[in-house]
Image: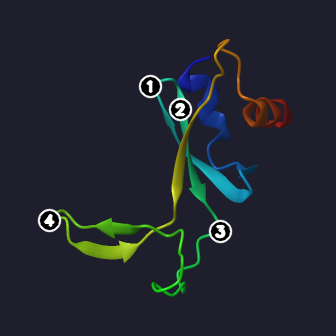
Amino acid sequence: MTCDDLRHIMGKQLNYKGHQCEIIEVLEDGPQLVLRNLDYDPAADASQDSRNPIQPNQFGEAHRRTPETFTVPALDKNQRPIAFLEKLIRAS
């Protein structure tokens, strides 16, 4: 399975480890999927335990809170699509 085989699922939503996520990128290394956590709350208080990491600017200074992302392998150890990916491919 190549990145070109996976690009058609970009933008699809899924549940990953209890978080509603969207596939935002397919990386060639692996291949891997980059998932954006849609549970992001821009109004979250910084003093609370927030899952919205602070994004630094080009100088390394704290700039803004951004949605959490997850990078997950698209294939298991047998080179088959991981479970949630296989469901998405069948549904497409």
Quarter of the image where one finds residue 66: bottom left
**Element on which disc 1 rests:** loop
**Kind of residue sitting beneath label 1:** Asp
Left or right side of 55 for 53: right
**Kind of residue sitting beneath label 3:** Asp
Left or right side of 22 for 65: left
Check residue 39 in the rendering and tell me which mark sits there, or answer none.
Answer: 3
Horizontal and vertical percent for residue 32? 53, 32
Mark 2 neighbour density, 10 Å: few (under 14) some (14–19) many (20 or more)? some
Task: Kindly check if marks 1 and 2 are in contact, taking CB atoms under 8 A apart as contact.
Answer: yes
CA separation in Å, label 1 and label 3 = 27 Å
Looking at the image, which residue is at 57% across and 56% down?
Answer: 36
**Kind of residue sitting beneath label 2:** Gln
Residue matched to label 1: 29
Dot 3 or dot 2, earlier in sequence:
2
Dot 4 or dot 1, earlier in sequence:
1
CA separation in Å, label 4 and label 1 = 28 Å
Check residue 59 in the rendering and tell me which mark sits there, or answer none.
Answer: 4
CA separation in Å, label 4 and label 2 = 28 Å
- Residue 70 vertical placement versus 48 (above, below): above
Dot 1 or dot 3, earlier in sequence:
1
Check residue 84 in the rendering and tell me which mark sits there, or answer none.
Answer: none
Dot 3 or dot 4, earlier in sequence:
3
Horizontal and vertical percent for residue 48? 53, 83
Residue matched to label 2: 32
Horizontal and vertical percent for residue 2? 56, 19
Identify which residue, 25 or 59, lies in the foreground: 59
